[in-house]
Image (cartoon, helix red, strand yellow):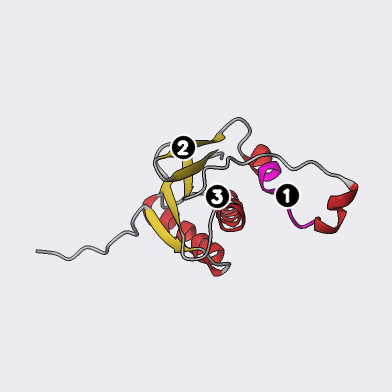
């Protein structure tokens, strides 16, 4: 029997901590390179950015210490689908600019990024123990 190299699984379980965002980005790059070789760099970059935003939001707003975040990827066909699961049912909502929020310029942009990179191709849903936020990024070129 020949031992074939194992492709990374399509699911990653992460701790509720800031370092998980980097782990998720690394996971996405490895997953796409193994499951969809030849994927254009700009597409991989877009998937990494969207995953980073979704995991950051799950960490900041969807978990407590000791909770877990699950990332699920599918890179088949003409798009890449990302799902991020967390244990809080509160759904994502757009944050609108205000004078009070000027000091938080580095926050509140995640959904704007989703709207720009996957317009009309993202959403959220309930799970038995929380929610999931999904996004699909079409391949171009």
User: Which residue has dot 1 on it?
Assistant: 108
Labels 2 and 3 touching (C-beta < 8 A): no
Q: Secondary structure at mark 3?
A: helix
Nearest to N terminus: mark 1 or mark 3: 3
Residue contact at pointers 1 and 2, CB within 8 angstroms: no
Q: Are marks 1 and 3 in contact (CB under 8 Å)?
A: no
Q: Which label number is shown at residue 126?
A: 2
Q: Magenta region: which residues?
A: 105-113
Q: Secondary structure at mark 2?
A: strand
In reply to whether residue 106 is colored magenta, the answer given is yes
Using the rendered view, name the quadrant where residue 111 is placed. Answer: top right
Q: Determine the CA span between mark 1 and mark 2.
A: 22 Å
Please identify, in this view, whether the residue under mark 1 or under mark 3 is nearer the observer: 1
Residue drawn 55% across the image and 62% down it: 21
Q: Quadrant of the N terminus?
A: bottom left
Looking at the picture, tell me which residue is in the foreground, 87 or 13.
87
Among the two numbered marks 2 and 3 on one chain, the one whose residue lies closer to the N terminus = 3
Circle 3 packing at 10 Å, graded few (<14), some (14-19), many (20+), is: many
Percent of width and height locating residue 99: 90, 48
Percent coordinates x, y for residue 80 in the rendering = 47, 43
Observer-side mark, 2 or 3, equals 2
For label 3, the residue is 47
Q: Label 2 neighbourhood size at 10 Å, few (<14), some (14-19), many (20+)?
A: some
Query: Which residue reaches farthest bottom?
Result: 19
| 24 inside magenta stretch | no
Q: Residue at the spot x=46%, y=65% of the render?
A: 66
Q: Which mark is residue 64?
A: none
């Amino acid at each position: 029997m020949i031992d074939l190299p194992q492709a990374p699984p399509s699911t990653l379980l992460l701790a509720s901590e800031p370092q998980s965002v980097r782990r998720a980005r690394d996971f996405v790059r490895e997953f796409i390179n193994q499951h969809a070789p030849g994927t254009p760099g700009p597409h991989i970059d877009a998937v990494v950015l969207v995953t980073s935003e979704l995991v950051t939001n799950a960490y900041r707003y969807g978990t407590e210490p000791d909770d877990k975040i699950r990332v699920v990827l599918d890179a088949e066909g003409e798009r890449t689908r990302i799902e991020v699961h967390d244990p809080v049912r509160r759904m994502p909502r757009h944050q609108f600019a205000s004078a009070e929020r000027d000091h938080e310029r580095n926050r509140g942009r995640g959904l704007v990024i989703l709207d720009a990179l996957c317009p009309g191709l993202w959403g959220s849903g309930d799970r038995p123990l929380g929610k999931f936020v999904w996004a699909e990024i079409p391949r171009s070129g």
